[in-house]
Amino acid sequence: MNAKPATQRKQVDFLIVGQGLAGTFLARALIERGKRVLVVDDDQRGSSSRVAAGLLNPVTGMRLRLTQGTGELLANSKKLFARLAQEHGREVFTPMPIRRLYASEKERALKSKRESGSEYAALVSADEPAGAPQAATGVPLADAQGSFVISGGGWVDLPLLLDLEAAWLRAHGALVSGVVSAASLRPDGATGVFWNDWHATGGVVFCNGWLAGREPCWEWLPWQPAKGEIIDCELTAETPAASAVAAAAVSAVAAPPPVSLETAPWILNRGGWAIPLGGGRWRSGSTWDWQRLDDTPTPEAGELLRQRLRGFFNPQTAFERCGLREDIVADARGGFVKAHLAVRRTKHPAADAITASANRAESKAVCGLTPPLRVSIVRHRAGVRPCVLGNEPFCGTHPHQPWLHLFGGLGPKGTFWGPTCAATLAALLCERTPLPPRFDLRRKAESGIRGATAGNPKNGS
Ligand SMILES: Cc1cc2nc3c(=O)[nH]c(=O)nc-3n(C[C@H](O)[C@H](O)[C@H](O)COP(=O)(O)OP(=O)(O)OC[C@H]3O[C@@H](n4cnc5c(N)ncnc54)[C@H](O)[C@@H]3O)c2cc1C
């Protein structure tokens, strides 16, 4: 490993392990400060960043919390995405409001309590009653408890961003394939390390996601890795609205325009989220599993996400859009015949068209008794999030081995924390600017946690 004479070694300032979001953002921040870096990635075998949906959502979780400093964190992220778009000539960030559908009255009360804060009020809209968004846009939401809109967010095309940045790093001779473990490193006696043919005078930065927690030098930090799965789907309204009977029903009255599930003007959020990708394609996520830490998609998670996506919508049949839903729902409990009779009783102009149908299944569908949404999975992925206790990332230098650094714990919010943490870690590594205590991994070491000195690489201090 260390056999070559020193003169034949290639020298950089920092070795970075992993080209996920953490490694990518940090490499750029260091290169832009004039540092030479070598990023070593094991060809993204365990990349959470490649799986992630890339949501940037300022108000998250069941408790609708706003993280301290949200405005600045959001601004830093968006500034970096805009700069990357300009440099690469490709947009990587799609700004999009997030419509949060209330799951309960308790949630509504929480929101009204929190919105007294001015930062919060700047990001969330007033409550909207059930049906209001649909009236404006035609998207049929299942928003029985109402909803509100979160602004300032959107989603990042992470595979695109990582590919563009990988090409940029390669052009700087700064990205190679390989596997780095703490055991494969040798300290140089000062602040640097040797790895294969390389000498990194400023040391090594572990940016390898949840797997950093498997390294003895970092295992003392409070890692809580969590597997997550997401699906991409084709969402189509099934045929009733397009059937001959429904068409007749619609043409018999001045019905509102047909509903479109092709896209929507918002990301939807309730428990999980759904991102409209356009052209009838939606991304739905995500699941949480702290036991099975692998990147294998499971049928159970796929089905749960499919149902969750379907649950965001309340598609109306053509007949419902004629304003007859109340009659049908009230009388339909006895099944098709009753519903059919209810239709006839309405004396609505559309009723003739419905009852003229000899096709029981079609009438039933038009009456709203057939689930009219089809969700077909076209892609299903899984990965492990580098979550940590307390939800704020861990950055900095090992308390006892100055050649080891870490940029980890981005958890479920790499797009939110990543750019800010990369900049602050680069300032520490290059200019010795102290890290904000909230990101400093010493916050854990100073609490006297067992093992902060354990697991030295070879030749440890
Ligand atoms: C299902 C799911 C949905 C998510 N949704 C979102 C979202 O909407 N928004 C959001 O902000 N975040 C989301 N996340 C979280 C996001 O993925 C992470 O916060 C972020 O990507 C972590 O980046 P990272 O660079 O720390 O780790 P990773 O992305 O895991 O990158 C680590 C890299 O290091 C490489 N590597 C590992 N070990 C070695 C080694 N020994 N040697 C060399 N290379 C190595 C890996 O192959 C990988 O390329 C989601 C995650 C999942 C799983």
Image (cartoon, rainbow, N blue to C red):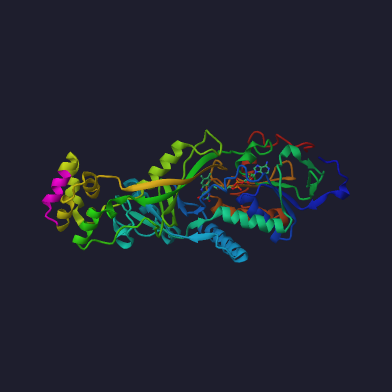
Give the farthest residue toward the front: 358
Secondary structure character of the magenta stretch overall: helix
Q: Position of residue 329 (x, y in %)?
A: 20, 46
- The quadrant of the picture occupied by the N terminus is top right
User: For residue 342: magenta?
Assistant: yes
- Start-end of magenta stretch: 338-348
User: For residue 235: magenta?
Assistant: no
Q: Is 407 located above or below residue 222 in the figure?
A: below
Left of 347 or right of it: where is 21?
right
Closer-to-camera residue (412/349) = 349
Q: Position of residue 230 (x, y in %)?
A: 48, 45
Question: What residue is drawn where x is 42% and y is 40%?
Answer: 303
Q: Position of residue 416 (x, y in %)?
A: 54, 54
Q: Position of residue 107 (x, y in %)?
A: 36, 48
Closer-to-camera residue (383/427) = 383
- Does residue 423 appear anywhere in the picture? no
Question: What residue is drawn where x is 76% and y is 50%?
Answer: 202
Which image quarter: residue 179? top right
- The quadrant of the picture occupied by the C terminus is top right
Q: How many marks?
A: 0
Which image quarter: residue 215? top right
